[in-house]
Image (spheres, rainbow, N blue to C red):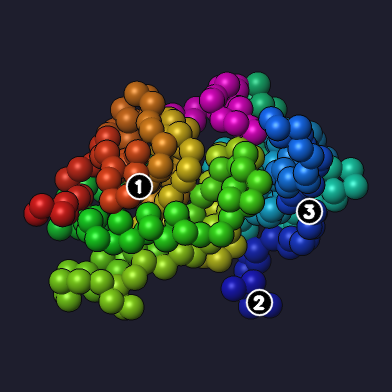
Amino acid sequence: MNGPDRWPPLPRLTAAHVPLTRDVLVVSADGSRRQVPLAAERALTLYVDRQELVTLMTLGQEPELLALGYLLNQGLVASATEIESITVDWDVAAAAVHTRHGVSGLAERLARRTVTTGCGQGTVFGDWLDRVPPLPPATQDAGSVEHAVLVQLLDAMRALPSIHREAGSVHGTALWQVQQAQQAQRESGGLGAAGEPQMLVHVEDVGRHNAVDTVAGWMAMEGVAGEGCWLYTTGRLTSEMVLKAAQLRIPLVVSRNGATAMGQQLAEQLHLTLIGRAGGGRYLCYSGAERLRLATD
């Protein structure tokens, strides 16, 4: 994708790595002592063309993709090709982003911030509620949600090895390709190997927004469109989470957690199917139920 014939090229990214957990000594209620792993939260300050932008509290799993996805989701750049390089240096806890032509109106956008409920993040820039167009209206004829495919996705996420299982205190986000699985489900009437949804990427971070931003960065680098995908998250379905999914053109977001009233309202406005309290074959659909093919249909 980023070969010599591509123009403009995708950004050059470093591959900075840090330990994602750290063992600490704890004392149990019975007085016994033992070592347990904890999520290694750390600060990463993002600089754009040498101007300090924001400090993110992150696990550090894919910091370059996090920086890229953050800039895309905040509307500070329109595409990954506007960025020349992203260099992460954990010795100074910084991500240096060099753009090709600068960020238009950056100072003005920095002055217009909205404080959010985002853990590990907390602000968005500019007219963030106005920059995302609605998705196509939800119908069962286009992009329908098969109950069996959704349940299989939930079962796979529950069994997935993760930092959360090892150390807790992190959120997870996964991008699933479901278009082929949906088609196979309709044609065969049941799920076989060809009808299984495919997980494209799974990211964990101390903040649910950071995890979604990292997925956005991955999509930009891999050229993956959101129309045939679903987004799974362990975090709350707030207005900002809905906005980011719609900006990625992902028609369905599912979480084991619940939704806020503003998140539900925004999902309805953007024609996004919002599913929460999901697990064990049960879930609540807060918006976009027109897409659902329930087990009783």
**Dot 2: few (<14), some (14–19), or many (≥20) neighbours within 10 Å?**
few
- The kind of residue tagged 3 is Pro
Q: State which mark lies toward you, 2 or 3.
A: 3
Q: Which residue is mark 1?
A: 279
Q: Which residue is mark 3?
A: 19
Question: What residue do we see at 29% from left, 73% from top?
Answer: 195
**Dot 3: few (<14), some (14–19), or many (≥20) neighbours within 10 Å?**
few
**Dot 1: few (<14), some (14–19), or many (≥20) neighbours within 10 Å?**
some
The quadrant where residue 54 appears: top right
Alpha carbon distance from label 2 to label 3: 31 Å
Image quarter hosting the N terminus: bottom right
The first of marks 1 and 2 along the sequence is 2
Alpha carbon distance from label 1 to label 2: 42 Å
Query: Are discs 1 and 2 less than 8 Å apart at CB?
Result: no
- The kind of residue tagged 1 is Gly
Which sits in the foreground, 193 or 129? 193
**Magenta residues?**
112-129
Alpha carbon distance from label 3 to label 1: 30 Å
Q: Secondary structure at mark 3?
A: loop
Q: State which mark lies toward you, 3 or 1.
A: 1
Q: Secondary structure at mark 2?
A: loop
Instruction: Determine the residue located farthest toward the front in the rendered image.
Output: 30
- In reply to whether residue 32 is colored magenta, the answer given is no
Q: Secondary structure at mark 1?
A: strand
Question: What residue do we see at 43% from left, 50% from top?
Answer: 232
**Viewer can see residue 190:** yes
The quadrant where residue 272 appears: top left
Q: Which residue is mark 2?
A: 3
Image quarter hosting the C terminus: bottom left
Which sits in the foreground, 198 or 39? 39
